[in-house]
Image (cartoon, rainbow, N blue to C red):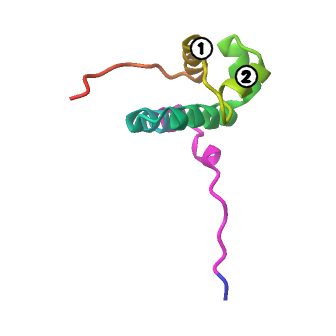
Amino acid sequence: MALKTSRLDIQDHLKSSEDRAAYLAAAFEEGDSEFIIQALNDIARAVGMAEVAKAAGVTREGLYKSLGENGDPKLSTLLGVMHALGVKLSATPAN
């Protein structure tokens, strides 16, 4: 009998602002820029790209491009998206 599996869809686990903030915090803790962009993309999709784009002050197409596979969002876009997602960026000592 074959083992039946299903694909994990991270968006199913990003329903609350706490879940979204924890996922993004883990991405920042990892320190990998590609992972951070992917996490922002996942969260924006869970919330709704059009809604996030509007709140961030960018076009939906621009948001897809910034958070896409080869995306490299400007700091202003990053801050706008984070504000739209209801999370904030903070700094702590690295030691």
Mark 2: amino acid = Glu
Question: In the drawing, does residue 60 fall left or right of residue 40?
Answer: right
Q: Number of labelled discs?
A: 2
Q: Name the mark on residue 51.
A: 2
The residue closer to the viewer here, 86 or 65, is 65
CA gap, disc 2 and disc 1: 12 Å
Determine whether 19 is above or below 67 in the image.
Answer: below
Residue 51 position, x and y percent, is 73, 22
Determine whether 32 is above or below 51 in the image.
Answer: below
Where is the N terminus found, in terms of image quarters? bottom right
Q: For residue 60, which quarter of the picture?
A: top right
Q: Would you say the residues marked 2 and 1 are in contact, meaning their CB atoms lie under 8 Å apart? A: no
The residue beneath circle 1 is 80
Mark 1: amino acid = Gly
Which stretch appears magenta?
A: 3-21
Q: Name the mark on residue 34.
A: none
